[in-house]
């Protein structure tokens, strides 16, 4: 029972840290009015490069899981990650197209 409680508290704490690391800096930047065209353009470009980098890494690990490790469990887990990655991209694209 103690291990389960520690695990739940760990995941809740990790979620709080991740959400606050994303939310608090953006909130402070909005208050200081630091969102200008240059920042937004650099932010979008950085996200685009990061997205392509993530996609390349997923493909490399996908290949390694089949060729080197011969593990179908790893292959299917990476497939789920890839589908989630591309599904979130599709949702983001739909939202961005809806705003324009």
Image (tube, rainbow, N blue to C red):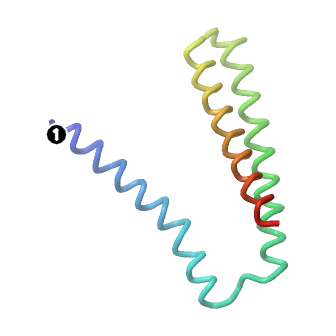
Residue 16, given in percent of the width and then of the height, sits at 41, 61
Furthest-top residue in this view: 70
Q: Quadrant of residue 81?
A: top right
Task: For label 1, count other residues whose C-alpha is less than 10 Å away and answer few (under 14), some (14-19) or many (20+).
Answer: few
Residue drawn at (78%, 73%), measured in percent from left and top? 40
Residue drawn at (49%, 59%), measured in percent from left and top? 18
Note whether 12 is above or below 2 in the view shown: below
- Left or right of 11 on screen, residue 21: right
Q: Quadrant of the N terminus?
A: top left
- Left or right of 17 on screen, residue 69: right
Judge by depth and name the residue closer to the eye, 60 or 99: 99
Label 1, secondary structure: give it. helix
Q: Quadrant of residue 69?
A: top right
Q: Quadrant of residue 3?
A: top left
Residue drawn at (29%, 45%), measured in percent from left and top? 8
Residue drawn at (79%, 36%), measured in percent from left and top? 56
- Left or right of 34 on screen, residue 26: left
Note whether 59 is above or below 13 in the view shown: above
Furthest-left residue in this view: 1
Furthest-bottom residue in this view: 32
Residue 41, given in percent of the width and then of the height, sits at 84, 70
Note whether 34 is above or below 91 in the view shown: below
Residue 79, given in percent of the width and then of the height, sits at 65, 25
Q: Quadrant of the C terminus?
A: bottom right
Residue 26, given in percent of the width and then of the height, sits at 60, 75
Note whether 21 is above or below 33 in the view shown: above
Q: How many marks?
A: 1
Q: Which residue is mark 1?
A: 2
């Amino acid at each position: 029972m103690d291990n389960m409680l520690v695990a739940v508290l760990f995941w809740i704490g990790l979620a709080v840290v991740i959400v606050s690391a994303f939310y608090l800096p953006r909130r402070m930047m909005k208050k200081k009015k630091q969102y200008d065209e240059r920042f937004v353009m650099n932010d979008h470009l950085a996200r685009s490069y990061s997205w392509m980098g993530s996609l390349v890494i997923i493909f490399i690990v996908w290949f390694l899981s089949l060729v080197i490790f011969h593990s179908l469990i790893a292959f299917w887990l990476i497939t789920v990650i890839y589908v989630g990655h591309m599904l979130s991209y599709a949702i983001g694209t739909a939202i961005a197209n809806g705003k324009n």
